[in-house]
Amino acid sequence: MVIQLLNLMEAATLEPAKRPNFKDFVYWLPYIIHPILAAIIGWAYFDHVSYNNLSALQIGACVPLFIKQIINVLPKGKPA
């Protein structure tokens, strides 16, 4: 949720013409999906190891950024 709040604060600094449509449901999907993915990855990662709260927070915060980076690396368009 921290990453999403940072994105929301960044969107608030944009000029009104460039701001996302906050009324659109698609804009709010990451606020639902990212915490769920972070919880699943965190559960899978920490299922059989000991951990502290800080490491769990770091893993959960990194998951949306990791997924975003994977999406940015994937080639665009149809494969040849």
Image (tube, rainbow, N blue to C red):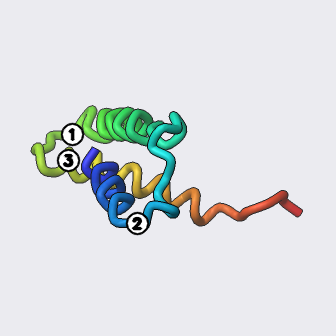
Q: Nearer the viewer, mark 3 or mark 1?
A: 3
> Residue at the spot x=14%, y=43% of the render?
51
**Which residue is at the front of the view, 55 or 22?**
22
- Circle 1: is it few (<14), some (14-19), or many (20+) Cα within 10 Å? few
**Disc 3 to disc 1, how far (Cα)?**
15 Å
**Disc 1 to disc 2, how far (Cα)?**
42 Å
Marked residue nearer the N-terminal end (3 or 1): 1
Residue, disc 3: 57
As shown in the figure, which amino acid type bears the numbered disc 2?
A: Leu
Q: Residue 16: where, in percent of width, then height?
A: 45, 61
Residue, disc 1: 49
On residue 66, the disc is none
Circle 3 — which element? helix
Marked residue nearer the N-terminal end (1 or 2): 2
**Disc 3 to disc 2, how far (Cα)?**
29 Å
Marked residue nearer the N-terminal end (3 or 2): 2
Circle 2 — which element? loop
Position above or below: 65 against 27:
below
Screen quadrant of the N terminus: top left
**In this image, 54 relative to 10: left or right?**
left
Q: Residue 28: where, in percent of width, then height?
A: 44, 38
Residue, disc 2: 14
> Residue at the spot x=73%, y=62% of the render?
76
